[in-house]
Image (tube, rainbow, N blue to C red):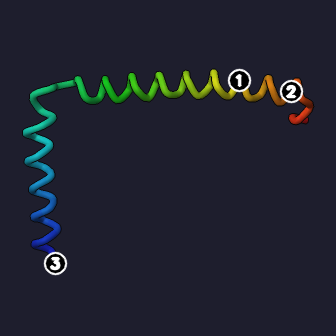
Amino acid sequence: MQQIWFGIGHFLQNTFEWFLTPFGWMPPVLFACVLGFGIVYWLRLQGRFNRKAKEEGGML
């Protein structure tokens, strides 16, 4: 069983080294930007939901 998990671990390590290393800091920066834009989008959407609920009396 240990050989299976070590095999999977070595496969993933080699794959990530081959795939992510040439890009340098691009994947983490891209992930952070997508996350940031998603948070801003959700907060704007939540603000609209809250404003609409307050106008309709649904929010106490």
Left or right: 47, with 55 as reference point: left
Asked if the residue under mark 1 is in contact with the one under mark 2, i.e. CB atoms within 8 Å, the reply is no
Q: In the rendered image, which residue does mark 2 sit on? A: 54
Marks 3,2: beta carbons within 8 A: no
Please tell me the numbered disc located at residue 2.
none
Q: Earlier in the sequence, mark 3 or mark 2?
A: 3
Check the image and report above or below for 10 versus 50.
below
Circle 3 residue = 1
How many residues crowd mark 2 within 10 Å: few (<14), some (14–19), many (20+)? few
Seen from the viewer's position, the closer of residues 40 and 56 is 56
Quarter occupied by residue 52: top right
Q: Amino acid under label 2?
A: Lys
Does residue 6 lie above or below 55 as drawn?
below
User: In which quadrant of the rendered image does the N terminus lie?
Assistant: bottom left
Q: Nearer the viewer, mark 1 or mark 3?
A: 1
Q: Amino acid at mark 3?
A: Met
Which residue is at a point 44% across and 29% down the rendered structure image? Answer: 35
Sequence order check: which comes first, mark 1 or mark 3? 3
Image-quadrant location for residue 33: top left
Q: Residue 40 location in percent, x, y?
A: 55, 22
Residue 54 place in picture, x, y as percent:
86, 27
- Judging by the rendered image, the residue that carries numbered circle 1 is 47
Q: Secondary structure at mark 3?
A: loop
| Quadrant in the picture for residue 53 | top right
User: From mark 2 to mark 1, how far is it between C-alphas?
Assistant: 10 Å
> What's the amino acid at mark 1?
Gly
Residue at the (15%, 74%) spot, across then down: 2
60 left or right, relative to 20: right
